[in-house]
Image (cartoon, rainbow, N blue to C red):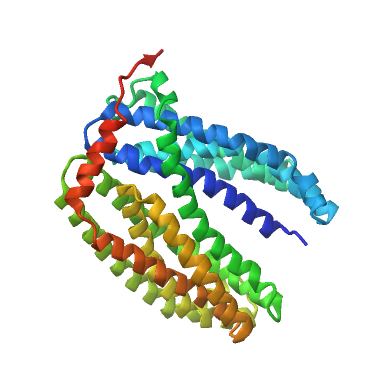
Amino acid sequence: MFNDSEFMFIINIFMYMFGVGMASGLETLCGQSYGAKQYQALGIHMQRAMLVLSLVSIPLAIIWANTTFILVALGQDPEISESAGAYAQFMIPSIFAYGLLQCLIRFLQTQNIVFPMMISSGITAVFHFLLCWILVFKSGLGSRGAALANTISYWINVLLLVLYVKFSSSCDKTWTGFSKEALHNIIPFVKLAIPSAVMVCLEMWSFEMVVLLSGLLPNPKLETSVLSISLNICWTVWMIPFGLGGAVSTRVSNELGARHPEAARLAVFAVLLIAITEGIVLGSVLILIRNIWGYAYTGELQVVNYIAAMMPILATSNFLDGLQCVLSGIARGCGWQKIGAYINLGSYYLVGIPTAVLLAFVLHIGGRGLWLGIISALIVQVSFLSIVTMRTNWEQEAKKTTDRVYDSEIPVHTVA
Protein backbone atom coordinates (compact mmCIF):
# COMPACT_ATOMS: atom_id res chain seq x y z
CA MET A 1 0.00 0.00 0.00
CA PHE A 2 1.03 3.58 -0.64
CA ASN A 3 2.27 5.39 2.45
CA ASP A 4 3.52 8.85 3.38
CA SER A 5 7.21 8.08 2.80
CA GLU A 6 6.52 6.71 -0.68
CA PHE A 7 4.44 9.76 -1.50
CA MET A 8 7.27 12.03 -0.37
CA PHE A 9 9.53 9.95 -2.61
CA ILE A 10 7.37 10.88 -5.61
CA ILE A 11 7.36 14.55 -4.58
CA ASN A 12 11.15 14.53 -4.31
CA ILE A 13 11.45 13.01 -7.78
CA PHE A 14 9.38 15.77 -9.31
CA MET A 15 11.02 18.52 -7.27
CA TYR A 16 14.56 17.48 -8.10
CA MET A 17 13.88 16.70 -11.74
CA PHE A 18 12.23 19.95 -12.64
CA GLY A 19 13.90 22.12 -10.02
CA VAL A 20 17.51 21.34 -9.15
CA GLY A 21 17.95 19.20 -12.27
CA MET A 22 16.69 21.42 -15.07
CA ALA A 23 17.93 24.64 -13.46
CA SER A 24 21.44 23.13 -13.38
CA GLY A 25 21.68 23.92 -17.09
CA LEU A 26 22.19 27.53 -15.96
CA GLU A 27 25.43 26.52 -14.24
CA THR A 28 26.90 26.03 -17.70
CA LEU A 29 25.29 28.95 -19.53
CA CYS A 30 25.38 31.63 -16.81
CA GLY A 31 28.77 30.55 -15.45
CA GLN A 32 30.49 30.62 -18.83
CA SER A 33 28.79 33.88 -19.87
CA TYR A 34 29.89 35.53 -16.64
CA GLY A 35 33.48 34.41 -17.16
CA ALA A 36 33.38 35.79 -20.71
CA LYS A 37 32.09 39.12 -19.33
CA GLN A 38 28.84 38.79 -21.30
CA TYR A 39 27.00 40.02 -18.24
CA GLN A 40 23.64 40.88 -19.80
CA ALA A 41 23.36 37.32 -21.09
CA LEU A 42 22.97 36.02 -17.51
CA GLY A 43 19.66 37.79 -17.03
CA ILE A 44 18.38 36.51 -20.36
CA HIS A 45 19.46 32.93 -19.58
CA MET A 46 17.68 33.14 -16.22
CA GLN A 47 14.46 34.48 -17.75
CA ARG A 48 14.54 31.75 -20.38
CA ALA A 49 15.05 29.07 -17.73
CA MET A 50 12.22 30.50 -15.62
CA LEU A 51 9.91 30.38 -18.63
CA VAL A 52 10.81 26.77 -19.45
CA LEU A 53 10.52 25.55 -15.85
CA SER A 54 7.19 27.33 -15.42
CA LEU A 55 5.83 25.65 -18.55
CA VAL A 56 7.13 22.26 -17.39
CA SER A 57 5.44 22.83 -14.01
CA ILE A 58 1.98 23.01 -15.60
CA PRO A 59 1.64 19.28 -16.41
CA LEU A 60 3.09 18.52 -12.98
CA ALA A 61 0.42 20.69 -11.38
CA ILE A 62 -2.27 18.84 -13.34
CA ILE A 63 -0.91 15.49 -12.13
CA TRP A 64 -0.80 16.67 -8.52
CA ALA A 65 -4.33 18.06 -8.78
CA ASN A 66 -5.52 14.57 -9.68
CA THR A 67 -3.38 12.67 -7.18
CA THR A 68 -6.35 11.18 -5.32
CA PHE A 69 -7.90 9.79 -8.51
CA ILE A 70 -4.55 8.42 -9.72
CA LEU A 71 -3.77 6.65 -6.44
CA VAL A 72 -7.24 5.10 -6.17
CA ALA A 73 -6.95 3.93 -9.79
CA LEU A 74 -3.64 2.29 -8.85
CA GLY A 75 -5.39 0.33 -6.12
CA GLN A 76 -4.25 2.36 -3.11
CA ASP A 77 -6.32 2.75 0.04
CA PRO A 78 -9.01 5.44 -0.60
CA GLU A 79 -8.46 7.13 2.78
CA ILE A 80 -4.69 7.39 2.30
CA SER A 81 -5.24 8.48 -1.31
CA GLU A 82 -7.57 11.25 -0.14
CA SER A 83 -5.02 12.48 2.41
CA ALA A 84 -2.17 12.33 -0.10
CA GLY A 85 -4.30 14.13 -2.70
CA ALA A 86 -5.12 16.96 -0.31
CA TYR A 87 -1.42 17.32 0.55
CA ALA A 88 -0.48 17.41 -3.14
CA GLN A 89 -3.09 20.04 -3.97
CA PHE A 90 -1.78 22.37 -1.28
CA MET A 91 1.73 21.83 -2.66
CA ILE A 92 0.84 22.78 -6.25
CA PRO A 93 1.88 26.47 -5.99
CA SER A 94 5.25 25.34 -4.61
CA ILE A 95 6.07 23.58 -7.90
CA PHE A 96 6.26 26.93 -9.66
CA ALA A 97 8.05 28.63 -6.76
CA TYR A 98 10.66 25.87 -6.54
CA GLY A 99 11.54 26.14 -10.22
CA LEU A 100 11.88 29.93 -10.04
CA LEU A 101 13.92 29.64 -6.84
CA GLN A 102 16.42 27.25 -8.41
CA CYS A 103 16.86 29.60 -11.39
CA LEU A 104 17.53 32.54 -9.06
CA ILE A 105 20.01 30.47 -7.05
CA ARG A 106 21.98 29.50 -10.18
CA PHE A 107 21.89 33.10 -11.45
CA LEU A 108 23.48 34.35 -8.22
CA GLN A 109 25.75 31.34 -7.63
CA THR A 110 27.46 31.67 -11.01
CA GLN A 111 28.33 35.28 -10.10
CA ASN A 112 29.86 34.09 -6.80
CA ILE A 113 27.08 35.85 -4.89
CA VAL A 114 26.49 33.45 -2.01
CA PHE A 115 26.05 35.42 1.23
CA PRO A 116 22.69 37.01 0.25
CA MET A 117 21.33 33.53 -0.46
CA MET A 118 22.38 32.45 3.04
CA ILE A 119 20.57 35.44 4.54
CA SER A 120 17.49 34.77 2.43
CA SER A 121 17.43 31.10 3.46
CA GLY A 122 17.85 32.07 7.13
CA ILE A 123 14.95 34.53 7.02
CA THR A 124 12.82 31.98 5.19
CA ALA A 125 13.65 29.31 7.79
CA VAL A 126 12.43 31.59 10.61
CA PHE A 127 9.16 32.23 8.77
CA HIS A 128 8.86 28.52 8.02
CA PHE A 129 9.06 27.56 11.70
CA LEU A 130 6.36 30.11 12.53
CA LEU A 131 4.17 28.99 9.63
CA CYS A 132 4.48 25.33 10.63
CA TRP A 133 3.55 26.15 14.21
CA ILE A 134 0.49 28.12 13.10
CA LEU A 135 -0.70 26.00 10.17
CA VAL A 136 0.12 22.52 11.46
CA PHE A 137 -0.49 22.75 15.20
CA LYS A 138 -2.70 25.78 15.83
CA SER A 139 -5.01 25.60 12.83
CA GLY A 140 -5.45 21.83 12.94
CA LEU A 141 -4.76 21.48 9.22
CA GLY A 142 -2.21 18.72 9.84
CA SER A 143 -0.40 17.55 6.71
CA ARG A 144 -2.26 20.11 4.60
CA GLY A 145 -0.90 22.81 6.87
CA ALA A 146 2.61 21.44 6.40
CA ALA A 147 2.18 21.56 2.62
CA LEU A 148 0.83 25.11 2.81
CA ALA A 149 3.75 26.15 5.04
CA ASN A 150 6.20 24.71 2.50
CA THR A 151 4.46 26.54 -0.34
CA ILE A 152 4.45 29.92 1.43
CA SER A 153 8.09 29.49 2.48
CA TYR A 154 9.22 28.80 -1.07
CA TRP A 155 7.46 31.92 -2.31
CA ILE A 156 8.96 34.01 0.50
CA ASN A 157 12.43 32.85 -0.54
CA VAL A 158 11.67 33.64 -4.19
CA LEU A 159 10.42 37.12 -3.26
CA LEU A 160 13.50 37.90 -1.16
CA LEU A 161 15.90 36.88 -3.94
CA VAL A 162 13.88 38.75 -6.59
CA LEU A 163 14.10 41.91 -4.48
CA TYR A 164 17.85 41.41 -4.09
CA VAL A 165 18.38 40.93 -7.83
CA LYS A 166 16.21 43.95 -8.62
CA PHE A 167 17.70 46.43 -6.15
CA SER A 168 21.23 45.24 -5.39
CA SER A 169 24.14 46.95 -7.13
CA SER A 170 25.83 43.54 -7.36
CA CYS A 171 23.42 42.59 -10.15
CA ASP A 172 23.46 45.89 -12.06
CA LYS A 173 25.40 44.40 -14.96
CA THR A 174 23.68 41.03 -15.09
CA TRP A 175 20.06 42.10 -14.59
CA THR A 176 18.97 44.82 -17.02
CA GLY A 177 15.24 44.11 -17.06
CA PHE A 178 12.92 41.75 -18.85
CA SER A 179 13.89 41.00 -22.43
CA LYS A 180 12.09 39.56 -25.45
CA GLU A 181 15.32 37.73 -26.27
CA ALA A 182 14.50 35.23 -23.52
CA LEU A 183 11.96 33.80 -25.97
CA HIS A 184 14.77 32.88 -28.38
CA ASN A 185 17.34 30.05 -28.15
CA ILE A 186 15.07 27.97 -25.92
CA ILE A 187 16.13 24.70 -27.56
CA PRO A 188 19.86 25.06 -26.61
CA PHE A 189 18.82 25.56 -22.98
CA VAL A 190 16.49 22.56 -23.07
CA LYS A 191 19.32 20.45 -24.53
CA LEU A 192 21.35 21.22 -21.40
CA ALA A 193 18.47 21.21 -18.93
CA ILE A 194 17.04 17.78 -19.74
CA PRO A 195 20.37 15.88 -19.42
CA SER A 196 21.04 17.89 -16.23
CA ALA A 197 17.72 16.69 -14.82
CA VAL A 198 18.45 13.13 -15.92
CA MET A 199 21.86 13.22 -14.18
CA VAL A 200 20.27 14.24 -10.89
CA CYS A 201 17.22 11.98 -11.06
CA LEU A 202 18.93 8.77 -12.16
CA GLU A 203 21.15 8.90 -9.10
CA MET A 204 18.39 9.92 -6.70
CA TRP A 205 15.98 7.29 -7.98
CA SER A 206 18.52 4.55 -7.35
CA PHE A 207 18.99 5.50 -3.68
CA GLU A 208 15.22 5.69 -3.17
CA MET A 209 14.75 2.41 -5.05
CA VAL A 210 17.09 0.68 -2.61
CA VAL A 211 14.86 1.75 0.28
CA LEU A 212 11.77 0.49 -1.53
CA LEU A 213 13.49 -2.83 -2.34
CA SER A 214 14.30 -3.25 1.35
CA GLY A 215 10.58 -3.76 1.94
CA LEU A 216 10.82 -7.04 0.02
CA LEU A 217 13.50 -8.48 2.30
CA PRO A 218 12.84 -10.82 5.25
CA ASN A 219 11.92 -8.72 8.30
CA PRO A 220 10.92 -5.77 6.08
CA LYS A 221 10.07 -3.49 9.02
CA LEU A 222 13.64 -3.65 10.34
CA GLU A 223 15.26 -3.43 6.90
CA THR A 224 13.13 -0.51 5.75
CA SER A 225 13.72 1.38 9.01
CA VAL A 226 17.50 0.96 8.81
CA LEU A 227 17.71 1.75 5.08
CA SER A 228 15.52 4.84 5.54
CA ILE A 229 17.77 6.05 8.36
CA SER A 230 20.83 5.28 6.24
CA LEU A 231 19.38 7.34 3.40
CA ASN A 232 18.69 10.20 5.80
CA ILE A 233 22.30 10.08 7.05
CA CYS A 234 23.61 10.10 3.49
CA TRP A 235 21.46 13.05 2.43
CA THR A 236 22.61 14.98 5.51
CA VAL A 237 26.34 14.52 4.92
CA TRP A 238 25.82 14.84 1.14
CA MET A 239 25.14 18.57 1.57
CA ILE A 240 28.88 19.20 2.02
CA PRO A 241 30.11 17.62 -1.24
CA PHE A 242 27.01 19.00 -3.00
CA GLY A 243 28.24 22.47 -2.03
CA LEU A 244 31.71 21.62 -3.31
CA GLY A 245 30.15 20.47 -6.59
CA GLY A 246 28.37 23.81 -6.96
CA ALA A 247 31.58 25.69 -6.16
CA VAL A 248 33.71 23.83 -8.71
CA SER A 249 30.96 24.15 -11.33
CA THR A 250 30.99 27.92 -10.90
CA ARG A 251 34.77 28.20 -10.86
CA VAL A 252 35.31 25.95 -13.90
CA SER A 253 32.58 27.62 -15.96
CA ASN A 254 33.85 31.11 -15.04
CA GLU A 255 37.46 30.28 -15.92
CA LEU A 256 36.56 28.57 -19.19
CA GLY A 257 34.39 31.55 -20.14
CA ALA A 258 37.31 33.86 -19.37
CA ARG A 259 39.62 31.72 -21.58
CA HIS A 260 41.74 30.65 -18.59
CA PRO A 261 42.08 26.89 -19.18
CA GLU A 262 44.96 26.46 -16.73
CA ALA A 263 42.98 28.13 -13.96
CA ALA A 264 40.07 25.78 -14.69
CA ARG A 265 42.40 22.79 -14.50
CA LEU A 266 43.84 24.04 -11.19
CA ALA A 267 40.33 24.51 -9.75
CA VAL A 268 39.48 20.92 -10.69
CA PHE A 269 42.46 19.44 -8.86
CA ALA A 270 42.08 21.76 -5.85
CA VAL A 271 38.42 20.88 -5.26
CA LEU A 272 39.05 17.17 -5.85
CA LEU A 273 41.73 17.32 -3.14
CA ILE A 274 39.27 19.04 -0.79
CA ALA A 275 36.64 16.38 -1.57
CA ILE A 276 39.08 13.56 -0.82
CA THR A 277 40.03 15.19 2.48
CA GLU A 278 36.38 15.81 3.38
CA GLY A 279 35.48 12.22 2.56
CA ILE A 280 38.24 10.78 4.72
CA VAL A 281 37.52 13.07 7.70
CA LEU A 282 33.74 12.69 7.60
CA GLY A 283 33.98 8.96 6.94
CA SER A 284 36.23 8.57 9.97
CA VAL A 285 33.74 10.49 12.11
CA LEU A 286 30.87 8.27 10.93
CA ILE A 287 32.83 5.15 11.84
CA LEU A 288 33.85 6.54 15.24
CA ILE A 289 30.26 7.39 16.22
CA ARG A 290 28.71 4.28 14.67
CA ASN A 291 27.71 2.74 18.02
CA ILE A 292 25.81 5.80 19.27
CA TRP A 293 24.46 7.49 16.14
CA GLY A 294 21.47 5.17 15.89
CA TYR A 295 20.11 6.50 19.19
CA ALA A 296 19.46 9.83 17.45
CA TYR A 297 16.69 8.04 15.52
CA THR A 298 15.41 5.28 17.79
CA GLY A 299 15.83 3.53 21.12
CA GLU A 300 15.38 0.04 19.68
CA LEU A 301 18.63 -1.84 20.26
CA GLN A 302 18.23 -4.04 17.19
CA VAL A 303 17.94 -1.02 14.89
CA VAL A 304 20.82 0.78 16.64
CA ASN A 305 23.11 -2.24 16.22
CA TYR A 306 22.14 -2.62 12.57
CA ILE A 307 22.90 1.05 11.92
CA ALA A 308 26.29 0.59 13.61
CA ALA A 309 27.02 -2.26 11.21
CA MET A 310 25.94 -0.08 8.27
CA MET A 311 28.12 2.90 9.20
CA PRO A 312 31.40 1.71 7.60
CA ILE A 313 29.45 1.03 4.39
CA LEU A 314 27.87 4.50 4.59
CA ALA A 315 31.30 6.05 5.19
CA THR A 316 32.60 4.41 2.01
CA SER A 317 29.49 5.51 0.14
CA ASN A 318 29.93 9.09 1.38
CA PHE A 319 33.57 9.16 0.27
CA LEU A 320 32.69 8.04 -3.26
CA ASP A 321 29.61 10.28 -3.38
CA GLY A 322 31.79 13.25 -2.48
CA LEU A 323 34.04 12.54 -5.45
CA GLN A 324 31.11 12.10 -7.82
CA CYS A 325 29.52 15.37 -6.61
CA VAL A 326 32.68 17.26 -7.53
CA LEU A 327 33.15 15.40 -10.81
CA SER A 328 29.50 16.02 -11.70
CA GLY A 329 30.00 19.71 -10.86
CA ILE A 330 32.94 19.78 -13.26
CA ALA A 331 30.73 18.18 -15.91
CA ARG A 332 28.05 20.87 -15.42
CA GLY A 333 30.64 23.62 -15.55
CA CYS A 334 31.96 22.30 -18.85
CA GLY A 335 28.58 21.48 -20.37
CA TRP A 336 29.02 17.68 -20.37
CA GLN A 337 25.52 16.97 -19.07
CA LYS A 338 24.72 14.49 -21.85
CA ILE A 339 27.88 12.49 -21.12
CA GLY A 340 27.06 12.57 -17.40
CA ALA A 341 23.53 11.31 -18.05
CA TYR A 342 24.81 8.31 -20.01
CA ILE A 343 27.40 7.53 -17.32
CA ASN A 344 24.77 7.72 -14.56
CA LEU A 345 22.36 5.53 -16.52
CA GLY A 346 24.97 2.82 -17.00
CA SER A 347 26.41 3.11 -13.49
CA TYR A 348 23.18 2.89 -11.53
CA TYR A 349 20.88 0.83 -13.73
CA LEU A 350 23.24 -1.52 -15.55
CA VAL A 351 25.58 -2.05 -12.59
CA GLY A 352 24.26 -0.67 -9.29
CA ILE A 353 20.67 -1.88 -9.03
CA PRO A 354 21.35 -5.34 -10.55
CA THR A 355 24.29 -5.78 -8.15
CA ALA A 356 22.12 -4.68 -5.22
CA VAL A 357 19.43 -7.22 -6.15
CA LEU A 358 22.05 -9.97 -6.58
CA LEU A 359 23.70 -9.30 -3.22
CA ALA A 360 20.48 -8.78 -1.26
CA PHE A 361 18.16 -11.41 -2.70
CA VAL A 362 20.42 -14.06 -4.26
CA LEU A 363 23.39 -14.00 -1.89
CA HIS A 364 21.11 -13.03 1.04
CA ILE A 365 23.30 -10.21 2.39
CA GLY A 366 20.18 -8.14 3.12
CA GLY A 367 20.14 -4.37 3.48
CA ARG A 368 23.93 -4.19 3.47
CA GLY A 369 23.89 -5.92 0.09
CA LEU A 370 21.51 -3.30 -1.27
CA TRP A 371 23.82 -0.50 -0.21
CA LEU A 372 26.88 -2.33 -1.53
CA GLY A 373 25.10 -2.28 -4.88
CA ILE A 374 24.95 1.52 -4.64
CA ILE A 375 28.67 1.56 -3.85
CA SER A 376 29.39 -0.51 -6.96
CA ALA A 377 27.45 2.08 -8.99
CA LEU A 378 29.40 4.93 -7.40
CA ILE A 379 32.70 3.21 -8.21
CA VAL A 380 31.73 2.90 -11.88
CA GLN A 381 30.37 6.46 -11.97
CA VAL A 382 33.46 7.99 -10.36
CA SER A 383 35.77 5.93 -12.57
CA PHE A 384 34.18 7.05 -15.83
CA LEU A 385 33.79 10.69 -14.77
CA SER A 386 37.45 10.66 -13.66
CA ILE A 387 38.56 9.28 -17.02
CA VAL A 388 36.59 11.97 -18.88
CA THR A 389 38.04 14.69 -16.62
CA MET A 390 41.64 13.47 -16.81
CA ARG A 391 41.52 13.18 -20.60
CA THR A 392 40.11 16.68 -21.02
CA ASN A 393 41.94 19.13 -23.25
CA TRP A 394 41.24 22.30 -21.28
CA GLU A 395 42.44 24.61 -24.04
CA GLN A 396 39.93 23.00 -26.37
CA GLU A 397 37.19 23.26 -23.72
CA ALA A 398 37.91 26.98 -23.38
CA LYS A 399 37.49 27.37 -27.14
CA LYS A 400 34.21 25.42 -27.08
CA THR A 401 33.02 27.67 -24.28
CA THR A 402 33.82 30.79 -26.28
CA ASP A 403 31.91 29.39 -29.24
CA ARG A 404 28.92 28.53 -27.02
CA VAL A 405 28.85 31.95 -25.35
CA TYR A 406 29.12 34.00 -28.52
CA ASP A 407 26.84 31.74 -30.57
CA SER A 408 24.08 32.46 -28.08
CA GLU A 409 24.84 36.17 -27.91
CA ILE A 410 22.07 38.21 -29.51
CA PRO A 411 21.08 41.89 -29.27
CA VAL A 412 19.40 42.69 -25.98
CA HIS A 413 16.12 44.62 -25.95
CA THR A 414 14.77 45.13 -22.48
CA VAL A 415 11.18 45.82 -21.63
CA ALA A 416 9.99 48.02 -18.84
Q: Position of residue 169 (x, y in %)?
A: 28, 26
**Quarter occupied by the C terminus:** top left
The total of numbered circles placed on residues is: 0
Q: Write down the quadrant of residue 222 in the picture.
A: bottom right
Taking the view exactly as shown, the residue that stands out farthest to the right is 78
Instruction: Please name whichever residue, 88 or 207, is drawn nearer the observer in this view of the structure.
Output: 207
User: Quick check: can you spot residue 137?
Assistant: no
The answer to whether residue 258 is seen in the rendering is yes
Relative to residue 217, is residue 260 depicted above or below?
A: above
| Residue at the bottom extreme, as displayed | 363
Q: Position of residue 84 (x, y in %)?
A: 74, 49
In this view, the residue in front, 332 or 306, is 332
Residue at position x 29%, y 32% from top? 407
Q: Is residue 146 left or right of residue 1?
A: left
Vertically, is 257 above or below 280? above
Left or right of 384, for residue 85 = right
Estimate the x, y position of residue 37 in percent, counting from the top left. 22, 32
Q: Is residue 306 left or right of residue 397?
A: right
Quadrant of the rendered structure where residue 115 is? top left
Instruction: State the image coordinates of residue 243 (x, y, percent, origin top left).
Output: 37, 54
Residue drawn at 46 percent across, 70 percent down: 377
- Residue drawn 25% across and 41% down? 401
